[in-house]
Image (tube, grey):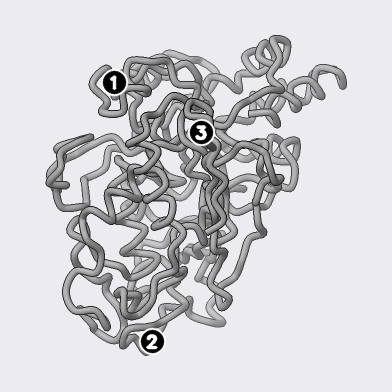
Amino acid sequence: MRSIFLAVALGAAAGGCGEGASPEAVDAGSETPIVGDPVDVPIDGVTKEQVAIFQAGDALFDLPLREADGLGPLYTRTSCSACHDEGTRGPGLVQKMSVVEADGKTPAKDQSKLAFGHTVHPLVAGGGKTPIAAPTGDPSIKLSIRVGPPVLGRGYMEAVLDSEIRRLVAEQAARTDGIKGRINLVAYQSEPNPTGKVHATKKGDKVIGRFGLKARIPFLDDFVADAAQGDMGITSPLRPKEIPNPDGLTDDAKPGVDLGLESLNLRADYIRLIAIPRRPGLTARGAELFASTKCGVCHASGLATRPDYPIALLAGIKADVYTDFLLHDMGDELADGLPAGEDGEATYRDWRTAPLIGLRFMKNYLHDSRAHSVEEAIAMHKGTGSEASGSVDLFQALSPTDRATLLAFVEAL
């Protein structure tokens, strides 16, 4: 592990260390930051005990898992960092598939061709023999890509009050420009976390989704448990069952639950403790343009956090997360064809507003990396039925100088 711990508050520094992707899997391109740039470090002011937790969780986040650890029977990657290298974006990705109508984007009512769900699981281990792949040569099957999102600053996001998210919904409902986000109210899929440290949610409870590209996941321990189960075939006390697979296996090379609760919680606490990277390039004029072009309606900042959040540094503050956590109709051009129910209440044209945290470390943008610059990503927000089309028009109407100022602002986040 190549850590460079420089926690500012303690005069030591913390840097994440990715082991990279499984060599058999497809990559979306590395987002590894410039050496020495402070990324994947703990929040300024954390205690020595929290630094120790951060370091231990970081090491587990990077640890490649093996058959003996419970890898399989289906998997996509062997470590968390393979999809979130240095806490940033990618290189790992997941392929999704859906049965669509003749228009190539509307989900068909009958999805029975996909007997084992809508996620491609290309690799097998621990007794698995049959991967889950998309049917070949079938024009009714739409494939889409989701690149592993950054995990930087996610503790701030978890700490934001539910009431703040509901406030944003109400404010947008009163708008007349077509921007009307929706909460993804999801049924909690995990078993209760016995620690009850961050939440006391029970399986089946309806809660506000926050994480994942369509806000399918409500909490960071659930985020870790879901990814371990779905991407690595690693079960845990929160997700104790293997996912359905063509071989009908209910276990793997490691009998019983694969991951202990302490190990899972350390990974989750590591994510909670990652700082929002410093943003030295932000300007007042850039902020004005960000507001006047309506970017800030959805990419909302200054959101109030819970006064009782267990990480004191994140409790009762204003968090500049640059997301409203809401689902927005982004139009036909960005549609993935996935039916409602696959990602909670999200439809095939819905995406949660991406939090603009650590954007300056990225080389490509949008959920599938199709945009190779911020300006290209902004342009792709415009489309048939997209709520963001008006905002794109305002951006494109700016003078060349103001456009450059706004782009510089966004690229500095």
**Residue 228 on image: x %, y %:** 34, 61
**Residue 101 on image: x %, y %:** 49, 63
Q: Please give the name of the residue rendered at 51% of the width and 15% of the height, measured from the top-left corner.
A: 176
Q: How many neighbours does mark 2 have within 10 angstroms: few (below 14), some (14-19), or many (20 or more)?
A: some
- Name the amino acid, label 2: Thr
Q: Please give the name of the residue rendered at 74% of the width and 22% of the height, measured from the top-left corner.
A: 406
**Residue 150 on image: x %, y %:** 52, 45
Q: Which of these two is toward me, 309 or 321? A: 309
Q: Is residue 404 above or below residue 187?
A: above
- Residue corresponding to mark 3: 7
Front of the two marks 1 and 2: 1
* SS assignment at label 3: loop
* SS assignment at label 1: loop
Q: Is residue 400 above or below residue 370?
A: above
**Residue 125 on image: x %, y %:** 37, 83
- In 3D space, how far apart are the residues under numbered discs 3 and 2 (Cα atoms)? 45 Å
